[in-house]
Image: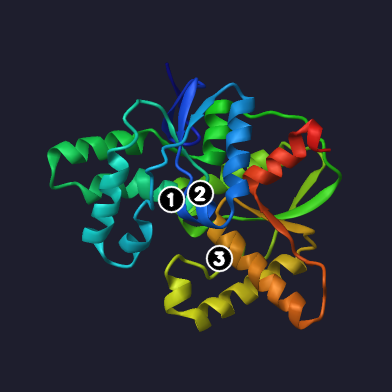
Amino acid sequence: MMTRDTAAGRQYPSKPTDVYLFATCLVDQFVPQAGLDTVRLLEREGIRVHYMEQQTCCGQPAHSSGFPDEARKVALQQLKLFTEPWPLVVPSGSCAGMLHQHYPALFADDPALHGAAKALAERTYELTEFLVHVVHFSRADQGPASAVALHTSCHARREMGSHETSVALLGSLSKVTVVTQARVEECCGFGGTFAMRYPDISEAIVTDKVAAIRDSGAQRVVSADCGCLLNITGRAAKQDEIAGLAEPTLPGEHIASFLWQRTNEAAT
């Protein structure tokens, strides 16, 4: 059964019994807790989560760096994996944007593969989007009062609109105050391969971002994209190190972990 959510402008299914998880490279390699907490959130809602171990990169780094042939090779591996008609849930707006927005165009010249890419794109959902519009997530806030800053990746904001669903989820927590940072729409400086190709520019951008978050009075930063989260908290940690501080002054979590911690009675 499909339902229409007019605010988001796309069709959403009723809550399914099964989903695929596309974990992303950064979750797999650097922030596995975000993946585990994504599974916990979904399983608590009565959804079976299927993780295909053969999954690799979504192809976004190659695609955004101007290498469509290489991106197509990587994307083809993903097209072969998710054969059941279940939603594909992605705890990253960047990777979800690649799958949802760009896969059909990658295979536009191959009718069979284009159809498969379009079908996969239509059932790909960024995690917060899925929690709000499909799961209708509503859980009591079990945590202490906290002021947090939300950072939404550029791809998540512009390709998936998931800044709105991230705000909705954090806003549903009764003891969480979401503070507004200056220039909230600006990039954190990560930008996938941008941070590696232009490290000095990236450092300048993330330094401004960290300053804006600190100035907002936030006690921590939350993001639905691990690349941005690692960049922001990493820069803040470096500043702490230079200042001789042992404890992090700007900690952060992926929003999946933040939601799990705040709504899991056993963890409080």
User: Does label 3 or label 2 sit earlier along the sequence?
Assistant: 2
Q: Nearer the viewer, residue 189 or 247?
A: 247
Residue projecting furthest to the top: 1
Query: Which residue is tagged 1?
Result: 95
Could you give the CA–CA distance between mark 1 and mark 2, rounded to whole angstroms?
Answer: 6 Å
- Which image quarter holds the C terminus? top right
- Which image quarter holds the N terminus? top left
Q: Secondary structure at mark 3?
A: loop
Dot 1 amino acid type: Cys
Q: Position of residue 141 (x, y in %)?
A: 79, 35
Q: Examine the rendering and report whether any part of residue 212 can be seen.
A: yes
Could you give the CA–CA distance between mark 3 and mark 1, rounded to whole angstroms?
Answer: 19 Å
Q: Position of residue 199 (x, y in %)?
A: 50, 80
Dot 3 amino acid type: Glu
Q: Position of residue 253 (x, y in %)?
A: 67, 53
Could you give the CA–CA distance between mark 3 and mark 2, rounded to whole angstroms?
Answer: 17 Å
User: Does label 3 or label 1 sit earlier along the sequence?
Assistant: 1
* Residues at circles 1 and 2 in contact by the CB criterion of under 8 Å: yes
Q: Nearer the viewer, residue 266 or 195?
A: 266
Q: Examine the rendering and report whether any part of residue 159 can be seen.
A: no
Query: Which residue is tagged 2?
Result: 92
- Return the mark for residue 186: 3
In screen coordinates, is 219 left or right of 115? right
Name which residue lies at 55% across and 65% down: 186
Q: Nearer the viewer, residue 77 or 158?
A: 77
